[in-house]
Amino acid sequence: MLIVPPRLALALLALSSALAPAAALAQSSPVTSSGGVARYTVPGLPAAIYLTLANRGNSAVSLVGASSPACSRLMLHQTMNANGMSMMADSAALPIPGNGSVTLAPGGYHLMCEDPNMTVGQQVSVILTFTGAPALTVSVPVKSAGGP
């Protein structure tokens, strides 16, 4: 049996009470996700994941990575037009302004899922990594590329 002097017990109780709200705040993210969908075509071809990210904090954050058990690799891409040709390029980061939002959508930023292991109708989990905010795990429905 451990005997703790009353003063030490009170100090530990006060410290844990003071740290509990700070720990809870550290875990909450200012970033939320909505409207997510994975667009799947056929086995062997990459799938795309689209969603809207809202930053409810006052400071800008950046999406810097993503992963999913449904993808061998999940990368942030941007579709661009150069000299009349559409092309995709890896993107290192996507800034999300404070009190603002960004939408990953066809023709712009999106998450490219290589070697997708998914089927239409299921939900897939996606872990989004940020600078300036904790990671965020979201679940998105899988829909066919030509479907609603």
Image: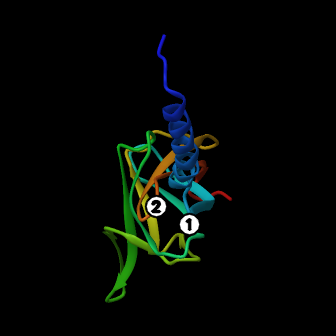
Residue at the outermost right position: 148
Q: CA distance from mark 2 to mark 1?
A: 12 Å
Describe the colour scheme in one phrase: rainbow
Residue 91 in view (yes/no): yes
Residue 138 percent coordinates (x, y): 56, 50
Is residue 49 shown above or below 117? below
Quarter of image, res 84:
bottom left
Few, some or many residues within 10 Å of mark 2 (<14, 14–19, 20+): many
Is residue 12 shown above or below 86? above
Query: In this view of the protein, which residue sits in the foreground, 110 or 82?
Result: 110
Q: Secondary structure beneath disc 1?
A: strand
Tell me the residue at 56%/57% (across/down): 145
Query: In this view of the protein, which residue sits in the foreground, 16 or 64?
Result: 16
Q: Is residue 120 left or right of residue 109?
A: right
Tell me the residue at 56%/71% (across/down): 57
Amino acid type at circle 2 is Ala
Q: Are marks 2 and 1 in contact (CB under 8 Å)?
A: no
Residue at the outermost top position: 1
Residue 97 percent coordinates (x, y): 50, 78
Quarter of image, res 120:
top right
The residue wearing badge 2 is: 133
Tell me the residue at 47%/15% (across/down): 2
Is residue 78 shown above or below 131? below
Residue 137 in view (yes/no): no
Amino acid type at circle 1 is Leu
Residue 127 percent coordinates (x, y): 47, 49
Quarter of the image with the C terminus is bottom right
Tell me the residue at 50%/57% (across/down): 49
Nearest-to-viewer mark from 2 and 1: 2
The residue wearing badge 1 is: 53
Mark 2 vs mark 1: which is more N-terminal? 1
Q: Secondary structure beneath disc 2?
A: loop
